[in-house]
Protein backbone atom coordinates (compact mmCIF):
# COMPACT_ATOMS: atom_id res chain seq x y z
CA UNK A 1 0.00 0.00 0.00
CA UNK A 2 2.56 2.58 1.11
CA UNK A 3 4.71 1.85 -1.95
CA UNK A 4 1.97 2.74 -4.39
CA UNK A 5 1.30 5.97 -2.52
CA UNK A 6 4.92 7.00 -2.25
CA UNK A 7 5.92 6.69 -5.90
CA UNK A 8 3.83 9.63 -7.15
CA UNK A 9 4.94 11.68 -4.12
CA UNK A 10 8.63 11.34 -4.81
CA UNK A 11 8.22 11.95 -8.53
CA UNK A 12 6.34 15.15 -7.65
CA UNK A 13 9.33 16.30 -5.65
CA UNK A 14 11.60 15.67 -8.62
CA UNK A 15 9.34 17.66 -10.95
CA UNK A 16 9.01 20.53 -8.52
CA UNK A 17 12.61 21.01 -7.51
CA UNK A 18 14.42 19.43 -10.42
CA UNK A 19 16.92 17.75 -8.08
CA UNK A 20 17.97 14.23 -9.05
CA UNK A 21 21.06 13.95 -6.86
CA UNK A 22 19.54 11.57 -4.30
CA UNK A 23 18.28 8.27 -5.72
CA UNK A 24 14.53 7.81 -5.54
CA UNK A 25 13.67 5.53 -2.66
CA UNK A 26 10.04 4.60 -2.17
CA UNK A 27 9.39 2.92 1.15
CA UNK A 28 7.72 4.81 3.98
CA UNK A 29 7.21 1.36 5.58
CA UNK A 30 10.76 1.68 6.85
CA UNK A 31 9.58 4.21 9.42
CA UNK A 32 6.95 1.72 10.55
CA UNK A 33 9.61 -0.97 10.86
CA UNK A 34 11.77 1.39 12.93
CA UNK A 35 8.88 2.18 15.29
CA UNK A 36 8.13 -1.55 15.63
CA UNK A 37 11.83 -2.07 16.36
CA UNK A 38 11.66 0.46 19.21
CA UNK A 39 8.54 -1.15 20.74
CA UNK A 40 10.00 -4.66 20.48
CA UNK A 41 13.16 -3.43 22.18
CA UNK A 42 11.10 -2.16 25.12
CA UNK A 43 9.49 -5.61 25.38
CA UNK A 44 12.88 -7.33 25.21
CA UNK A 45 14.21 -5.07 28.00
CA UNK A 46 11.33 -6.11 30.23
CA UNK A 47 11.85 -9.81 29.37
CA UNK A 48 15.63 -9.76 29.89
CA UNK A 49 15.66 -7.76 33.13
CA UNK A 50 12.66 -9.71 34.41
CA UNK A 51 14.49 -12.97 33.74
CA UNK A 52 17.62 -11.72 35.54
CA UNK A 53 15.61 -10.51 38.55
CA UNK A 54 13.49 -13.67 38.78
CA UNK A 55 16.53 -15.91 38.64
CA UNK A 56 18.54 -13.68 40.99
CA UNK A 57 15.89 -13.79 43.73
CA UNK A 58 15.30 -17.55 43.50
CA UNK A 59 16.05 -18.99 46.92
CA UNK A 60 14.38 -21.72 48.90
CA UNK A 61 15.26 -23.19 52.28
CA UNK A 62 13.61 -26.41 53.30
CA UNK A 63 11.81 -26.35 56.68
CA UNK A 64 13.86 -29.23 58.11
CA UNK A 65 17.56 -29.57 58.78
CA UNK A 66 20.10 -31.95 60.29
CA UNK A 67 22.70 -31.11 62.88
CA UNK A 68 25.32 -30.27 60.27
CA UNK A 69 23.41 -29.20 57.24
CA UNK A 70 20.52 -27.03 56.22
CA UNK A 71 18.91 -27.79 52.87
CA UNK A 72 18.92 -24.68 50.74
CA UNK A 73 18.80 -24.05 47.01
CA UNK A 74 19.43 -20.67 45.44
CA UNK A 75 20.73 -19.47 42.11
CA UNK A 76 24.23 -19.63 43.68
CA UNK A 77 23.92 -23.42 43.70
CA UNK A 78 24.52 -23.64 39.98
CA UNK A 79 27.31 -21.86 38.13
CA UNK A 80 25.03 -21.88 35.09
CA UNK A 81 22.41 -19.82 36.92
CA UNK A 82 25.02 -17.29 38.04
CA UNK A 83 26.08 -16.98 34.39
CA UNK A 84 22.40 -16.56 33.49
CA UNK A 85 21.88 -13.65 35.90
CA UNK A 86 25.02 -11.82 34.75
CA UNK A 87 24.31 -12.37 31.05
CA UNK A 88 20.67 -11.35 31.20
CA UNK A 89 21.60 -8.16 33.09
CA UNK A 90 24.19 -7.42 30.40
CA UNK A 91 21.66 -8.04 27.62
CA UNK A 92 19.14 -5.76 29.34
CA UNK A 93 21.79 -3.05 29.71
CA UNK A 94 22.73 -3.34 26.04
CA UNK A 95 19.08 -3.08 25.01
CA UNK A 96 18.64 0.11 27.05
CA UNK A 97 21.75 1.61 25.47
CA UNK A 98 20.53 0.59 21.98
CA UNK A 99 17.29 2.60 22.31
CA UNK A 100 18.86 5.90 21.11
CA UNK A 101 20.04 4.20 17.92
CA UNK A 102 16.55 2.85 17.38
CA UNK A 103 15.22 6.42 17.77
CA UNK A 104 17.71 7.61 15.15
CA UNK A 105 16.36 4.92 12.81
CA UNK A 106 12.84 6.28 13.37
CA UNK A 107 13.89 9.86 12.63
CA UNK A 108 15.96 8.89 9.59
CA UNK A 109 14.34 5.72 8.24
CA UNK A 110 16.56 5.53 5.15
CA UNK A 111 19.90 5.83 6.96
CA UNK A 112 21.89 2.59 6.77
CA UNK A 113 24.42 3.40 9.52
CA UNK A 114 22.29 2.94 12.67
CA UNK A 115 20.64 -0.20 11.28
CA UNK A 116 24.00 -1.75 10.41
CA UNK A 117 25.30 -0.92 13.89
CA UNK A 118 22.22 -2.42 15.52
CA UNK A 119 22.19 -5.57 13.38
CA UNK A 120 25.81 -6.40 14.23
CA UNK A 121 25.49 -5.79 17.98
CA UNK A 122 22.08 -7.51 18.05
CA UNK A 123 23.68 -10.63 16.56
CA UNK A 124 26.36 -10.69 19.24
CA UNK A 125 23.88 -10.21 22.09
CA UNK A 126 21.45 -12.71 20.54
CA UNK A 127 24.21 -15.30 20.84
CA UNK A 128 24.87 -14.30 24.46
CA UNK A 129 21.19 -14.39 25.39
CA UNK A 130 20.58 -17.73 23.64
CA UNK A 131 23.62 -19.31 25.28
CA UNK A 132 22.54 -18.35 28.79
CA UNK A 133 18.87 -19.21 28.18
CA UNK A 134 19.67 -22.64 26.73
CA UNK A 135 22.24 -23.59 29.37
CA UNK A 136 19.85 -22.59 32.16
CA UNK A 137 17.11 -24.57 30.41
CA UNK A 138 19.35 -27.66 30.36
CA UNK A 139 19.95 -27.39 34.12
CA UNK A 140 16.27 -26.73 34.83
CA UNK A 141 15.41 -29.82 32.80
CA UNK A 142 17.83 -31.90 34.86
CA UNK A 143 16.40 -30.45 38.08
CA UNK A 144 12.92 -31.48 36.96
CA UNK A 145 13.71 -34.93 35.57
CA UNK A 146 17.07 -35.93 36.97
CA UNK A 147 19.23 -38.42 35.09
CA UNK A 148 19.15 -42.17 35.64
CA UNK A 149 22.48 -43.23 34.17
CA UNK A 150 24.48 -40.77 36.24
CA UNK A 151 22.27 -41.13 39.33
CA UNK A 152 21.43 -37.43 39.49
CA UNK A 153 18.14 -37.13 41.36
CA UNK A 154 15.40 -34.69 40.42
CA UNK A 155 15.36 -31.99 43.09
CA UNK A 156 12.07 -30.38 42.10
CA UNK A 157 10.10 -32.64 44.43
CA UNK A 158 11.83 -31.00 47.37
CA UNK A 159 12.54 -27.55 45.97
CA UNK A 160 9.24 -26.89 44.20
CA UNK A 161 9.22 -23.10 44.52
CA UNK A 162 12.84 -22.83 43.44
CA UNK A 163 12.13 -24.87 40.33
CA UNK A 164 9.04 -22.86 39.44
CA UNK A 165 10.91 -19.59 39.77
CA UNK A 166 13.94 -20.67 37.71
CA UNK A 167 11.67 -22.18 35.04
CA UNK A 168 9.79 -18.92 34.61
CA UNK A 169 13.08 -17.04 34.37
CA UNK A 170 14.12 -19.37 31.54
CA UNK A 171 10.81 -18.84 29.73
CA UNK A 172 11.20 -15.08 30.04
CA UNK A 173 14.72 -15.24 28.63
CA UNK A 174 13.50 -17.21 25.60
CA UNK A 175 10.98 -14.43 24.96
CA UNK A 176 13.95 -12.05 24.77
CA UNK A 177 15.68 -14.45 22.33
CA UNK A 178 12.65 -14.56 20.02
CA UNK A 179 12.43 -10.76 20.06
CA UNK A 180 16.12 -10.54 19.14
CA UNK A 181 15.58 -12.80 16.12
CA UNK A 182 12.63 -10.63 15.03
CA UNK A 183 14.72 -7.46 15.45
CA UNK A 184 17.54 -8.82 13.26
CA UNK A 185 15.17 -10.06 10.55
CA UNK A 186 13.35 -6.71 10.49
CA UNK A 187 16.57 -4.71 10.33
CA UNK A 188 17.87 -6.92 7.53
CA UNK A 189 14.65 -6.49 5.51
CA UNK A 190 14.64 -2.72 6.04
CA UNK A 191 18.29 -2.51 5.04
CA UNK A 192 18.10 -4.81 2.04
CA UNK A 193 14.96 -3.63 0.27
CA UNK A 194 14.77 -0.22 -1.38
CA UNK B 1 43.21 -2.70 -2.31
CA UNK B 2 40.48 -4.02 -4.58
CA UNK B 3 38.47 -0.80 -4.21
CA UNK B 4 41.24 1.39 -5.58
CA UNK B 5 41.59 -0.95 -8.54
CA UNK B 6 37.89 -1.19 -9.28
CA UNK B 7 37.00 2.52 -9.37
CA UNK B 8 38.91 3.31 -12.60
CA UNK B 9 37.53 0.09 -14.10
CA UNK B 10 33.90 1.04 -13.63
CA UNK B 11 34.47 4.61 -14.87
CA UNK B 12 36.19 3.13 -17.93
CA UNK B 13 33.06 1.12 -18.67
CA UNK B 14 30.92 4.24 -18.44
CA UNK B 15 33.23 6.13 -20.81
CA UNK B 16 33.37 3.29 -23.32
CA UNK B 17 29.70 2.42 -23.56
CA UNK B 18 28.07 5.61 -22.42
CA UNK B 19 25.52 3.72 -20.31
CA UNK B 20 24.57 5.37 -17.02
CA UNK B 21 21.39 3.40 -16.35
CA UNK B 22 22.84 1.35 -13.48
CA UNK B 23 24.08 3.45 -10.57
CA UNK B 24 27.84 3.40 -10.12
CA UNK B 25 28.68 1.16 -7.24
CA UNK B 26 32.29 0.95 -6.25
CA UNK B 27 32.96 -2.09 -4.11
CA UNK B 28 34.62 -5.09 -5.69
CA UNK B 29 35.38 -6.05 -2.07
CA UNK B 30 31.87 -7.49 -2.03
CA UNK B 31 33.05 -10.33 -4.23
CA UNK B 32 35.86 -10.97 -1.76
CA UNK B 33 33.34 -11.02 1.09
CA UNK B 34 31.19 -13.50 -0.85
CA UNK B 35 34.16 -15.82 -1.45
CA UNK B 36 35.11 -15.56 2.24
CA UNK B 37 31.48 -16.37 3.06
CA UNK B 38 31.69 -19.56 0.97
CA UNK B 39 34.96 -20.69 2.60
CA UNK B 40 33.63 -19.98 6.12
CA UNK B 41 30.53 -22.00 5.32
CA UNK B 42 32.68 -24.99 4.37
CA UNK B 43 34.46 -24.66 7.71
CA UNK B 44 31.17 -24.41 9.58
CA UNK B 45 29.87 -27.56 7.83
CA UNK B 46 32.93 -29.46 9.02
CA UNK B 47 32.54 -28.11 12.56
CA UNK B 48 28.79 -28.81 12.81
CA UNK B 49 28.84 -32.30 11.29
CA UNK B 50 32.01 -33.12 13.23
CA UNK B 51 30.30 -32.08 16.45
CA UNK B 52 27.23 -34.18 15.66
CA UNK B 53 29.34 -37.24 14.76
CA UNK B 54 31.62 -36.90 17.80
CA UNK B 55 28.68 -36.57 20.15
CA UNK B 56 26.72 -39.32 18.43
CA UNK B 57 29.52 -41.88 18.77
CA UNK B 58 30.30 -41.09 22.40
CA UNK B 59 29.81 -44.29 24.35
CA UNK B 60 31.74 -45.75 27.23
CA UNK B 61 31.11 -48.93 29.20
CA UNK B 62 33.00 -49.39 32.42
CA UNK B 63 34.98 -52.66 32.71
CA UNK B 64 33.18 -53.77 35.88
CA UNK B 65 29.53 -54.57 36.52
CA UNK B 66 27.22 -55.88 39.21
CA UNK B 67 24.74 -58.69 38.91
CA UNK B 68 21.93 -56.35 37.84
CA UNK B 69 23.61 -53.41 36.27
CA UNK B 70 26.33 -52.55 33.82
CA UNK B 71 27.76 -49.05 34.01
CA UNK B 72 27.45 -47.39 30.67
CA UNK B 73 27.33 -43.80 29.51
CA UNK B 74 26.45 -42.74 25.99
CA UNK B 75 24.90 -39.70 24.40
CA UNK B 76 21.51 -41.37 25.00
CA UNK B 77 22.00 -40.86 28.72
CA UNK B 78 21.19 -37.17 28.46
CA UNK B 79 18.22 -35.72 26.60
CA UNK B 80 20.34 -32.62 26.06
CA UNK B 81 22.93 -34.60 24.13
CA UNK B 82 20.26 -36.19 21.93
CA UNK B 83 18.98 -32.68 21.18
CA UNK B 84 22.57 -31.69 20.43
CA UNK B 85 23.09 -34.45 17.86
CA UNK B 86 19.81 -33.73 16.06
CA UNK B 87 20.33 -29.97 16.03
CA UNK B 88 23.91 -30.09 14.85
CA UNK B 89 22.95 -32.47 12.03
CA UNK B 90 20.17 -30.04 11.05
CA UNK B 91 22.57 -27.08 11.13
CA UNK B 92 25.07 -28.99 8.99
CA UNK B 93 22.33 -29.88 6.51
CA UNK B 94 21.18 -26.26 6.31
CA UNK B 95 24.77 -25.11 5.70
CA UNK B 96 25.17 -27.57 2.83
CA UNK B 97 21.91 -26.36 1.28
CA UNK B 98 22.98 -22.72 1.73
CA UNK B 99 26.12 -23.19 -0.39
CA UNK B 100 24.34 -22.56 -3.75
CA UNK B 101 23.07 -19.20 -2.46
CA UNK B 102 26.59 -18.32 -1.39
CA UNK B 103 27.76 -19.16 -4.93
CA UNK B 104 25.08 -16.86 -6.35
CA UNK B 105 26.43 -14.09 -4.08
CA UNK B 106 29.91 -14.68 -5.55
CA UNK B 107 28.65 -14.52 -9.13
CA UNK B 108 26.45 -11.47 -8.52
CA UNK B 109 28.18 -9.63 -5.66
CA UNK B 110 25.81 -6.63 -5.77
CA UNK B 111 22.56 -8.61 -5.63
CA UNK B 112 20.70 -8.03 -2.37
CA UNK B 113 18.31 -10.99 -2.62
CA UNK B 114 20.62 -13.94 -1.82
CA UNK B 115 22.33 -12.03 0.98
CA UNK B 116 19.01 -11.10 2.57
CA UNK B 117 17.86 -14.71 2.32
CA UNK B 118 21.09 -15.97 3.87
CA UNK B 119 21.16 -13.39 6.67
CA UNK B 120 17.63 -14.28 7.81
CA UNK B 121 18.13 -18.06 7.74
CA UNK B 122 21.60 -17.72 9.26
CA UNK B 123 20.08 -15.87 12.20
CA UNK B 124 17.55 -18.63 12.80
CA UNK B 125 20.16 -21.39 12.60
CA UNK B 126 22.61 -19.38 14.70
CA UNK B 127 20.00 -19.43 17.46
CA UNK B 128 19.49 -23.19 17.03
CA UNK B 129 23.23 -23.93 17.04
CA UNK B 130 23.89 -21.68 20.06
CA UNK B 131 21.03 -23.22 22.02
CA UNK B 132 22.27 -26.78 21.52
CA UNK B 133 25.92 -25.88 22.06
CA UNK B 134 25.22 -23.98 25.28
CA UNK B 135 22.85 -26.57 26.75
CA UNK B 136 25.35 -29.37 26.02
CA UNK B 137 28.07 -27.22 27.58
CA UNK B 138 26.00 -26.83 30.74
CA UNK B 139 25.59 -30.61 31.05
CA UNK B 140 29.28 -31.23 30.29
CA UNK B 141 30.17 -28.72 33.00
CA UNK B 142 27.97 -30.58 35.48
CA UNK B 143 29.52 -33.90 34.43
CA UNK B 144 32.97 -32.48 35.09
CA UNK B 145 32.29 -30.64 38.34
CA UNK B 146 29.06 -32.05 39.75
CA UNK B 147 26.94 -29.92 42.05
CA UNK B 148 27.24 -29.94 45.82
CA UNK B 149 23.88 -28.49 46.85
CA UNK B 150 21.89 -31.00 44.83
CA UNK B 151 24.29 -33.90 45.50
CA UNK B 152 24.94 -34.53 41.81
CA UNK B 153 28.31 -36.28 41.61
CA UNK B 154 30.86 -35.58 38.90
CA UNK B 155 30.91 -38.58 36.58
CA UNK B 156 34.07 -37.68 34.68
CA UNK B 157 36.28 -39.55 37.13
CA UNK B 158 34.65 -42.78 36.02
CA UNK B 159 33.66 -41.92 32.45
CA UNK B 160 36.84 -40.13 31.39
CA UNK B 161 36.68 -40.97 27.67
CA UNK B 162 32.99 -40.14 27.46
CA UNK B 163 33.62 -36.73 29.00
CA UNK B 164 36.56 -35.99 26.71
CA UNK B 165 34.53 -36.87 23.64
CA UNK B 166 31.45 -34.84 24.58
CA UNK B 167 33.64 -31.89 25.57
CA UNK B 168 35.34 -31.83 22.18
CA UNK B 169 31.94 -32.02 20.47
CA UNK B 170 30.87 -28.94 22.44
CA UNK B 171 34.04 -27.07 21.49
CA UNK B 172 33.48 -27.95 17.83
CA UNK B 173 29.90 -26.69 17.99
CA UNK B 174 31.04 -23.37 19.43
CA UNK B 175 33.38 -23.02 16.46
CA UNK B 176 30.30 -23.32 14.24
CA UNK B 177 28.54 -20.64 16.35
CA UNK B 178 31.45 -18.21 15.98
CA UNK B 179 31.50 -18.79 12.21
CA UNK B 180 27.74 -18.08 12.06
CA UNK B 181 28.23 -14.74 13.85
CA UNK B 182 31.01 -13.85 11.38
CA UNK B 183 28.79 -14.82 8.42
CA UNK B 184 25.94 -12.59 9.61
CA UNK B 185 28.21 -9.62 10.32
CA UNK B 186 29.88 -9.97 6.90
CA UNK B 187 26.55 -10.26 5.07
CA UNK B 188 25.21 -7.21 6.92
CA UNK B 189 28.29 -5.15 6.05
CA UNK B 190 28.16 -6.21 2.39
CA UNK B 191 24.44 -5.42 2.23
CA UNK B 192 24.60 -2.10 4.09
CA UNK B 193 27.59 -0.41 2.49
CA UNK B 194 27.48 0.75 -1.13
Image: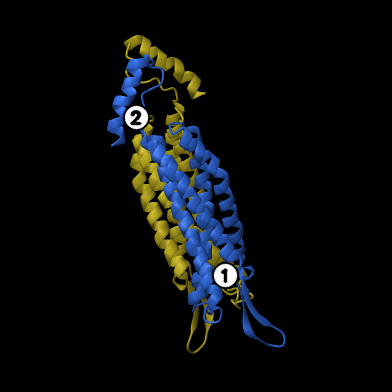
Chain colours: A blue, B yellow
Q: Is residue B125 above or below residue B117?
A: below
Q: Residue furthest right?
A: A68
Residue A125 visible in the displayed image: yes
Give the distance between the C-alpha atoms of the residues marked 2 and 1, in whole angstroms.
Answer: 57 Å
Which chain does tag 2 point to?
A
Q: Is residue B9 left or right of residue A5?
A: right
- Give the residue number, with chain letter if any, for mark 2: A26
Coordinates of residue B43 in the picture (x, y in percent) = 46, 46
Q: Secondary structure at mark 2?
A: loop
User: Which residue is at a point 53% across and 62% down the rendered structure image?
Assistant: A135
Coordinates of residue A134 in the picture (x, y in percent) = 50, 61
User: Which residue is at a point 41% across and 17% down the rendered structure image?
Assistant: A21
User: Which residue is at a point 55% across and 64% down the rendered structure image?
Assistant: B138
Coordinates of residue A54 in the picture (x, y in percent) = 56, 65
Which disc number belongs to residue B38? none
Coordinates of residue A19 in the picture (x, y in percent) = 39, 15
Q: Is residue B156 left or right of residue B24?
A: right
Residue A152 visible in the displayed image: no
Which chain does tag 1 point to?
B
Q: Nearer the viewer, residue A18 or B142?
A: A18
Quarter of the picture containing the C terminus of chain A is top left
Quarter of the picture containing the N terminus of chain A is top left
The reply to whether label 2 and label 1 mark residues of one chain is: no
Q: Is residue A42 above or below residue B135?
A: above
| Residue count near mark 1 (Cα–Cα under 10 Å), binned few <14, some 14–19, many ≥20 | many
Q: Nearer the viewer, residue B99 or A139?
A: A139
Which disc number belongs to residue B143? 1
Of circles 2 and 1, the one toward us is 2
Q: Nearer the viewer, residue B78 or B151?
A: B151
In the picture, residue A35 is in which quadrant? top left
Q: Secondary structure at mark 1?
A: helix
Amino acid sequence: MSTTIDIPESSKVVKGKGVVAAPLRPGGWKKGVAIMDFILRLGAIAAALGAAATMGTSDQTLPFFTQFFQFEASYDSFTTFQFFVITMALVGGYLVLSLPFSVVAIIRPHAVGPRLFLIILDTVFLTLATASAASAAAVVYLAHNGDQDTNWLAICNQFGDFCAQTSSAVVSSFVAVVVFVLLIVMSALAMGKP
